[in-house]
Amino acid sequence: MDPKLGDGLQSIGSPEWNALSLGRKRYVLWASMRNSASEFIQSGLDEHAARRALDREIKRRCIWLAGREQAGTLARKDFCFLPGQGWRQPLILDVAMETFLPLGMAYWLEPSGSWQL
């Protein structure tokens, strides 16, 4: 698939998307890409059908997560892809986290709009 098909997806400009933490965005993209890949195969390798499925799934999952959060049924680490213990964090991220982004796990668990720098 052409990587440019992800450019300009309406779903990633939504308030629900912007309210997600980086860890939850990773989950949403992973789950949405699974459904998009399935649509791609089922549609006879139609890239535009896969793009529509990706946009639809991102929007659907963001709204679902927002609803769970508003209902108070979403724990901080639920549906949140955090880096594993074996992940080697890029050096530039290490430097940033030690100097001007001293956020710790908030980097992954809180929306960027709520970071206290």
Image (cartoon, rainbow, N blue to C red):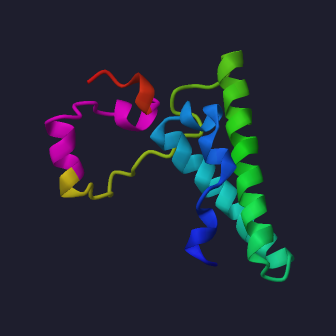
In this view, the residue in front, 76 or 49, is 49
In this view, the residue in front, 80 or 62, is 62
Q: Would you say residue 107 is visible in this rendering?
A: yes
Above or below 47: residue 83: above
The span picked out in magenta is 93-111
Q: Is residue 98 magenta?
A: yes
Residue 61: x and y, percent? 71, 42
- Report the residue at 75% width, 68% height from top: 50
Residue 58: x and y, percent? 69, 48
In this view, the residue in front, 47 or 27, is 47
- Report the residue at 67% width, 33% height from top: 65
Q: Which residue is at the far front?
A: 8
- Report the residue at 61% width, 63% height from top: 6
Above or below 59: residue 112: above
Residue 57: x and y, percent? 74, 51
On the rendered structure, is 76 left or right of 105? right
Above or below 53: residue 96: above
Q: Is residue 19 magenta?
A: no
